[in-house]
Amino acid sequence: MNNQLSGEDIHRYSNRFWKWILGVVFFCALLIFSTGLGLFGKLPSFRDLENPKSNLASEVISGDEVILGTYFIQNRSNVRYDEISPNIINALIATEDIRFYSHSGIDFKRTFTILFHNLMGKKQGASTITQQLALNLFSEEGRATNHLKRFVQKLKELIIAVKLERNYTKEEIITMYLNTVDFGSYNTFGIKSAARTYFNTTPNKLSPEQAAVLVGMLRGTSLYSPIRNPERSKARRNTVLSNMEKAGFLSNSESELLQRKRLILSFSLSDHNDGSATYFRAVLKKDIKTILQENNINKSDGTPYDLDRDGLKIYTTINSRMQLYAEEAQREYLKDLQAQFNAQWGGRDPFKGFEQLIDQGIKRSDRYRQAIAEGKTQSQIKADFNKPTKMSIFTWKGNIDTIMRPLDSLKYYKLMLRNAIMSMEPQTGYVRAWVGGTNYEYFQYDQVKMGTRQVGSTAKPFTYLTALEKGFSPCFQVLNEPITIDDWTPKSEGTIPGYLTLKKAMARSQNYITAYVMREVGATAVSTLIKRLGITSDVPAYPSICLGTFDASLYDMVGAYSVFANHGIWTEPIYLLRIEDRNGLVLYEKKPKIAVALEEQYAYAMTNMLKSVVTEGTGVRLRYKYNLMNPIGGKTGTTQNNSDGWFIGITPQLVTGVWTGCEDRAIHFLSTKQGEGANSALPIFALLMKRVYADPTLKYSKDDFDPPKNGIDITMDCNTYTQKTSPPPSTK
């Protein structure tokens, strides 16, 4: 039998082969053409390519251009090409797409080479960086696992990749890729987030070995995770470094040296509590949602903006360094103050007679709400709260893992002191520091603006100011004796006997003389003035408001005191400057509100009286203990039973308020010595200001307050004051 093929057979088989090849080519072309027509699903339009969609974190940016934190579904923030280290670009090209700069979206040479490898059983990927970008941008479900769906998806990637190459430069494509790629299971998307999460750095500072770790993860973010599989990650890193050497991006000696290095990370898990000013950012987020809704600010397609997805740029007035100093001052002093508080309650039951506080706390807890959602009965819930459970609790020495009954943890947190700080510039209204609580992870209620508390003696300047407007002099003398107004008689501790000037009475926080002034000027006049100074909470015209029995927010109180430092002009405290979309288009810009609240001479006279609080009154420890010798005015405040401690301090360029107390007013210091504002709030102000003055970049001076340009008719020097034979007429 003749085994040799005849020429006719060869010709016939050759025709069949080429027909088969042409058929496959024709079929593939038909598939690509059909895909392009949208037969297998809609493809992105030219407009979509010009504006690719991706979940992009919105950034909260400080006044000194530091990102305070982000709002996100996917923790992704974009960077520009010039903000990316050449090391990450070189590592990516060397490993993922060596002919990136020469192909037009599809690397045909690599495609056929890898097709051959796959037929040989050596499975490899053939996608170029541009094709991977197409998948990241326009395949919301990610890489399909079904073979048929993946095949269709691959056809779409090819078409989109070519379109991307036609619309963008190579630099833009590689930047978009690095901004959209997923770097693992820690909600880390994009090179900026990855650099921060794994190495606590920025993309422009990534070293070759760090870049190699991140690029190595792209083969399999879990398999080559430096956290979960450090040995595999190191081996993969070294493979990437070898690729960089082969591509000419590293020398042989550099590659060998870097491969010998051990894997060094600076891992920091990102969540919404990361960054600075967490309480501020929580309040700001609610405000922005309201602003966008009330002003009907929507995207070009008419849909509302999503803070967690649309990559807005939110510019604020917060100064990142001052914010840091405020948070540091709080931590430094609250640690000691909490120890004082705990020592006072040692061996006593603070909840005796206040058992309802525990019941309220249980019903407000997440654990209770979860139990109700699961259909548990009250007896089952009670049993759960008495069952020892593993948990992490907050302490001033750091979080501690322990076993504790949920009921005991609730009592523990009820006894934790809370604190809030706000600092603003009186001339601009710019809020420079905002600390709404002690730890946002555990205590999420903002005490700067959202919460209100009784203001205590910080309200006394309002009564004395009303008297100044009605003709009283700071040097007018009053006998310091008990007084009754409409069946109300104030209590007084530390009463100084004899006649005192109004200036000294306010400096030493004397209740009887404050009540006397209230009787003379009338509660309605004081209440009206308080509202004029920007207090938005209810201030009823009762005589007791002279001692601060009304509630107000720290935000409003700092704003009111800023009138004294700003020559009688009230400037609304503002913290949001503008909102921009991801392309820099301004969506909203804040316009500050300004009003003349006082005549300049009355503001200056009150400033002088507040300075006496520091030089000879309840704020004197600013001088002798904290050595703050520059001109500072201020007022301490302590409420009934020492439930609240306040201090509001003013300088010509900054007004800063501090509040301290427990969650429930029934839980408080037992001793005024520890619970008064001079001990529970003033030291935090002092520690903050010392840090502020020690930082020359902040440029806050130690100058004195400027006197009124048109002079002043009020006698400020009580040594030259001639006592009137009778006080101004009563206006009660």
Image: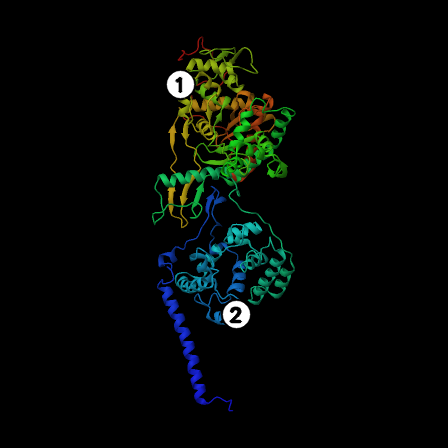
Upstream in the sequence, badge 2 or badge 1? 2
Q: Residue furthest top?
A: 725
Residue 687 vs 489, above or below: the answer is: below
The image shows residue 641 at horizontal and vertical percentages of 55, 21
- Residue 537, located in which quarter of the rendered image? top left
Give the mark toward the camera: 2 or 1. Answer: 2
**Does residue 155 appear anywhere in the picture?**
yes
Kindly identify which numbered label has been placed on residue 481. none
The image shows residue 355 at horizontal and vertical percentages of 56, 25
Count residues near mark 1 (Cα–Cα under 10 Å), then give few for <14, some for 14-19, many for 20+: some
- Element carrying mark 2: helix
Q: What residue does disc 2 label?
A: 118
Asked whether, in this view, residue 143 is left or right of residue 30, the answer is right
Residue 396 vs 352, above or below: the answer is: below
Count residues near mark 2 (Cα–Cα under 10 Å), then give few for <14, some for 14-19, many for 20+: few
- Element carrying mark 1: helix
Residue type at numbered disc 2: Asn
- Residue 40, located in which quarter of the rendered image? bottom left
Residue type at numbered disc 1: Ala
Residue 638 vs 268, above or below: the answer is: above
Kindly identify which numbered label has been placed on residue 525. 1
- Residue 140, located in which quarter of the rendered image? bottom left
**Does residue 711 appear anywhere in the picture?**
no
The C terminus lies in quadrant: top left
